[in-house]
Amino acid sequence: QVQLVESGGGLVQAGDSLRLSCAASGRTFSSYGMGWFRQAPGKEREFVAAISWSGANTYYADSVKGRFTISRDNAKNTVYLEMNSLKPEDTAVYFCAAEHLAGITIATARLSQGYSYWGQGTQVTVSS
């Protein structure tokens, strides 16, 4: 069982930066692949970024590639999403997700159905 708590959201202007954090409970955090997803009002939840259990592999949605960076600190049981050059279209609730490494693949890492554990989300609002 993994419990996830996101933080770091807020209201910023276009072009600004934010860093989201996701703190995980449990002693086996390093055994989980982690993902960030977002959901804007009236839209489906969409993939943003994912990172393998070791941090060696990262994946990004085309819409954020080059602007967002996912990283993790297994000693702190935390995964981060550094967001730069934010745009109004980045406005959404951002969710952290986790799936045990035995149950995640390169294909499923980009799918919300590929994750068993979710945080409650943190709001990011980017004004123009």
Image: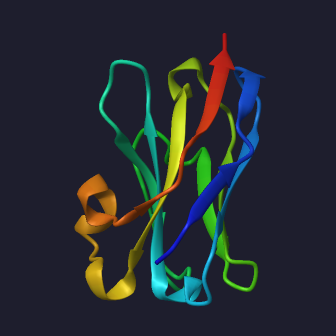
Q: Residue at x 31, y 88 (%)?
A: 102
Question: How many callouts does the rendering have?
Answer: 0
Q: Residue at x 30, y 77 (%)?
A: 104
Counting from the top left corner in percent of width and height, residue 63 is at: 43, 38
Residue 9, compared with residue 81, is above or below; it is above
Q: Quadrant of residue 125?
A: top right
Q: Nearer the viewer, residue 105 or 60?
A: 105
Is 88 on the left or on the right of 128, as rendered?
left
Q: Quadrant of residue 71?
A: bottom right
Counting from the top left corner in percent of width and height, residue 65 is at: 49, 48
Is 48 on the left or on the right of 116, as rendered?
right
Can residue 51 be seen from the camera position used here? no
Q: Nearer the viewer, residue 23 or 126?
A: 23
Counting from the top left corner in percent of width and height, residue 93 is at: 53, 34
Q: Could you tell me which quadrant the C terminus lies in?
A: top right
Is 54 on the left or on the right of 83, as rendered?
left
Is 30 on the left or on the right of 48, as rendered?
right
Q: Nearer the viewer, residue 7 or 15?
A: 7
Can residue 83 be seen from the camera position used here? yes
Residue at far top of view = 128
Q: Quadrant of residue 21?
A: bottom right
Q: Residue at x 55, y 67 (%)?
A: 3
Residue 79, compared with residue 10, is above or below; it is below
Q: Residue at x 52, y 54 (%)?
A: 119
